[in-house]
């Protein structure tokens, strides 16, 4: 494999999911990160994938069921299962992946998915949440935002998105499970202020970890770190390369 992105297709619940794998240089299995986008996932964090590749990592960006050309219908509850399917694919033996150095990096809603998956999957060896949702009970999404997001997603509507958020608030949220994950390296990165996912989400998650998670706050950044990309990417890559 070259360092160029390689398109890959794998299945989750019978649906084909689309992704791009950025392969790090060097011989033998490599540490690997799966990058999880938010809702609907306009920001794909491709610059972070390239930076990880340049640091010798593999990085996979893929799209959940019902989003960005992947088959199936979009459901929030199905995203952690799609993440598991991506991990199954990467650890199948077809790719130069070291299964003992597998990380999840989630942005926005992807941060929620990363921690939910990690809480029930011992294959995850590190988690980074960037501007992540940590508590569905306190995360607010307006009907107007839900309507805008639904335009990009298959098989759902604004009403269904809001209903699914309320339903997931009654389940085990990242703030509910992070205290059980104290041996897992976790990095919380958040902007201050963040007008899409309040910094209180990051603060509550860090408090629930009882200090076992690392917290980086980037003042003056927005939700996508649009003018602070280099700072965010460098901090994440540095942390991951030291932890794994």
Image: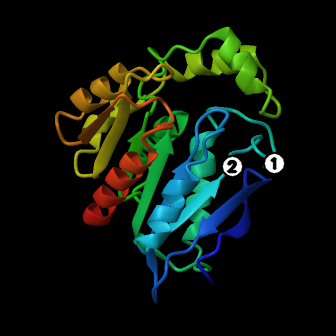
Which of 186 and 80 lies nearest the eye of the viewer? 186
Identify the image quadrant of the C terminus.
Answer: bottom left
* Residue name at image x 28 percent, y 44 percent: 181
Rendered location of residue 223, percent (x, y) = 48, 30
The residue most toward the front is 227
Residue that carries the numbered disc 1 in the rendered image: 69
Residue at x 58%, y 61% (from the top left corner)? 60
Q: Picture quarter containing residue 241?
A: bottom left
Residue marked by disc 2: 63
Q: CA distance from mark 2 to mark 1?
A: 8 Å
Question: Which x, y percent locates residue 218?
Answer: 32, 35
Residue 242 located left or right of residue 68: left
Furthest toward the top, the residue is 143
Residue 134, image quadrant: top left
Q: Position of residue 75 (x, y in %)?
A: 69, 33
Query: In the drawing, does residue 8 fall left or right of residue 139?
Result: right
Q: Are marks 2 and 1 in contact (CB under 8 Å)?
A: yes
Q: Earlier in the sequence, mark 2 or mark 1?
A: 2
Q: Evaluate whether residue 152 shows in this view.
A: yes
């Amino acid at each position: 494999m070259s360092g160029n992105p390689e398109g890959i297709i794998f299945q989750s619940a019978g649906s084909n999911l689309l992704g791009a794998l950025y392969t790090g240089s060097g011989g033998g299995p490599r540490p690997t990160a799966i990058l999880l986008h938010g809702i609907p996932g306009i920001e794909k964090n491709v610059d972070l994938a390239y930076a990880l590749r340049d640091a010798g990592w593999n990085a996979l960006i893929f799209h959940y069921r019902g989003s960005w050309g992947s088959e199936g219908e979009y459901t929030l509850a199905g995203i952690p299962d799609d993440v598991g399917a991506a991990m199954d694919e990467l650890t199948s033996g077809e790719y130069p992946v070291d299964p003992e150095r597998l990380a999840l990096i989630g942005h926005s809603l992807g941060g929620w998915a990363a921690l939910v998956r990690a809480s029930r999957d011992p294959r995850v060896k590190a988690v980074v949440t960037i501007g992540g949702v940590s508590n569905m009970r306190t995360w607010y999404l307006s009907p107007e935002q839900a309507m805008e997001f639904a335009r990009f997603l298959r098989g759902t509507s604004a009403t269904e998105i809001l209903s699914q958020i309320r339903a997931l608030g009654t389940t085990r949220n990242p703030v509910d499970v992070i205290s059980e994950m104290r041996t897992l390296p976790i990095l919380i990165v958040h902007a201050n202020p963040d007008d899409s996912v309040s910094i209180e989400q990051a603060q509550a998650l860090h408090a629930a970890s009882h200090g076992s998670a690392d917290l980086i706050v980037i003042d003056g950044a927005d939700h996508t770190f649009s003018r602070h990309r280099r700072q965010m990417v460098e901090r994440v890559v540095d942390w991951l390369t030291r932890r794994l």
